Amino acid sequence: MIDVQNLSKYFGPVLAVNNVSFQVEKNEIVGLLGNNGAGKTTLMRILTTYLSASSGIARVAGFDVMTHSLEVRRRIGYLPESIPLYPEMRVEEYLVYRAKLKGVDRRQRASRVGYCLERCKVAEVRRRLNGTLSKGYRQRVGLADAMISDPPILILDEPTDGLDPGQKAETLAMLRELGRDHTIMLSSHLLSEVESLVQRVIIIRRGHIALAKKLSELETDDVIVIEVRGPSDQVALTLRNTEGVAQVTPKGGEDGLAFFEVRTHQHQDLRELISQRLAKNGWPLRRLDLRRRSLQDRWNEINNWDEFAAAEPNPHSSTAVTT
Amino acid sequence: MPSRAITQTPQTRPESSWRHPSDTGPSLMRRDDPKLARAIGVAAAAAIIFGGMALVLQTSGRVTPLGVGWATFLLTLGIAGLLFHAAFDSDLQIRRVYMAFGYLCLGVGGFLAIVPYNKQPGALFGQGFMCLFLGLLFLLAFLRNEEDAWFRNLAENILGGAGALMAVIGLVGGNIKGEFLTPYGLLLALLGLIYLIAFVGSRGVSDNLAYRTGLGIGGVGILVWAVALLRSALPPLFYRWHWTSTQPGDYFVPYGLLLMAVGLLYVAVSLLECSDWPWIVLTRRELGSLFYSPVAYIVLFAFAIVHWLAYFLVVLNLLDNVSVPEPIVGRFFLQWLVVIGTIVAVPVLTMRLLSEEKRTGTLEVLLTAPVDETAVVVSKFLAACIMYMAMWLPFGLLLIYLRLAGGSEFDYRPLFSFTIGLAATSAAFVSMGVFFSSLTRSQIASGVLTCAGMIVLTIIFLVNSVVSSSSPSSAWVTVLKHVSYIDVWIDTLDGRLLPRQLLFFLSMTVIWLFGSIKVLEARKWA
């Protein structure tokens, strides 16, 4: 439903989106994660045709966002980050107006507005002025607006921002239900809620994709954590020379201890082999553990990239195409 | 013995009214307290009794402490107070009483409008018209609060039926007899239209009957317009082609024009009510937002004062001169006060149009819905144009008053050409305002730029005056005359409608609007 290829966006000298590529399948829920200023909102604005890309191609529901923007807009529901609403309009009046603009048939309009009011829990404030609503209500009115024409694709910029915990849980449950027959792309800062909702995450860092994986794949992405007493360089060399080891990452050390994280080819469990090698060299093993990396770990790794990697990642490596 | 507490089947609990906290608002909602409305209602009733009694006593020749003016003022205030009470007190008995009062007004109004008085049919039409209008207002206030479907349905159907009847009588009668059209037919057609708008608005266009009524209004409008056009155009043509030997009377001015205007008004209302075309939907919202903010009211009020001062100056002028040459109406509009009012009003009306949307971010929501930049710009332009033209309406009322109070006729026909000239020039002003508003997020900056533009356009007239007095044969005189909007006003008020003058302002409109659309599109490439 969403197909993005080598998309870049410059704001003058600022490269906001850097050669991004990904696809979102029909009825898939995808979470777009990233720090403030990472490029999430710019990417969403390009997908919703509000901005044009500097280069690259984006297709939504099979239509190019550049050349068929009206066709794209007919098929999306968009909740912007700041939820701008006309303050002088009443909630129900606003939704009727938006339903008209989005071409909801006259006969279904009243029932559709009623459904969205109920579904987004704003029925009680239907007669209140938008300008007098609290942040949580504004958020829900914005969500009702995005849903009003029942579009096949929902693009939601931080849909749970400003909601209290109860409302958050309800909104997530609603989105989960909507995700059965809608394609949803949402951005968020909160990893826990993304983990509980989405099938796939795309982590954006400084405009490029740092990670694009299904959550199920992420869970099998194991790391062997090692704590050993011995010379760091030699231990690292031994570990690297062990068959099946793909990557050894030193994590520092103190008092003669060395810490490592080891990734293996095809997620092999090499704990026994590694313990044998270390024992053979006479280095006492303090800890040998298989750690499943959570989304939080990946997030931390990506955001602390500068700390662990001397150089910037190759822009081409940011192109992560998943299916 | 087993414990009853464990073995006994728990009684079914009564259904609780408790709901999950997220289902309800964080604040407690309570019904509006009608105390204030009731106090106003009681005061209003007293005002009506005193005012009404004073009026009745005055008409029967008695002397009362209240003069006619004060009595009428009290009566008007009282009726306004009652309407307020009717709208904000939703108590069952009170709203039904107002419903009955609304029906009573309707019945009395209908009776007075028809019944002959002193053997003159329609002698009490004015009073009947007022009653019919009041009836509409009270029924609308009742509908605002009524929840019972049967009563709502009845009131809505009565409104719709009465509206349709008035429209048919006004339009058919006005077509049959010109004298009936002014004023009876015209007033009935307009009041009927307001009744029909109330009917459609109350039921909502999701309702099939209301939707078809809305479409019907448009159909009737097209029919009336077409008939008026044919009746205006065909007889002179037949006479010119010698198909008829009798010279036709002057139907086009005013009857044909009036009927065509009414027809177009019906079509416009139908479009605004029923159309889902984005241009119309957006224009409607824009007009609504203009009236939600105090800006529209301040501008209307200020312009009304300008009109009143202009009227005052003209009347002073008329009193000084024994004979005033025609066109009298020209003396109203061609005053510096009116020009200054225009220079200020245009920026005030247009400065927020696009800059406000940019500042608050609503433009993002708007332009990610299936509407293009052209629809956004044109709808804002149309709404501001309609608003600007509406500001000139008090002038019309003052002219009617001048005719009634002055007692002598004057040539009103230049008003038709002036309306067209005014529309063309205001389109150019408003489109300029839309363009400047598209450039910036700041309303102030947009307003200042538009005001500067208006001043430049006005200075052109002064430059032209200087040039034409120093070298009348200069080509610049012709050029500047085309560009000066005040010259267009002068010419149209003299009854001259020159397409070449209008063309400049219309092309200026197109260019400003095109520029605004391009500025909006340019956001994509920021």
Image (spheres, coloured by chain):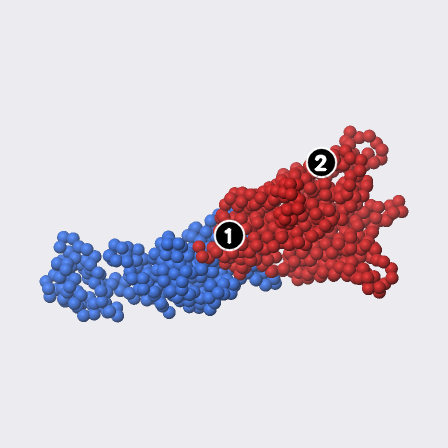
Picture disc at residue B403: none
Q: Amino acid at mark 1?
A: Thr
In front: A50, or B419? B419
Give the residue at x 41% y 60%.
A54
At numbered mark 2, what does the secondary structure look like: helix, strand or loop?
A: helix
Which chain does the blue colour mark? A
Task: Locate residue B461, reporting x and y percent.
Answer: 63, 43
Q: Is residue B344 left or right of residue B499?
A: left
The 10 Å Cα crowd at callout 1, few under 14, some 14 to 19, many 20 or more, is: some
What residue is shown with label 1? B362
Q: Is residue B203 left or right of residue B177?
A: left
Label 2 marks a residue whose chain is B
Measured Cα–Cα span from mark 1 to mark 2: 45 Å
What residue is shown with label 2? B313
Task: Locate residue A313, reporting x and y percent.
Answer: 29, 60
In front: B354, or B84? B354
Earlier along the polypeptide chain: callout 1 or callout 2?
2
Which chain does the red colour mark? B
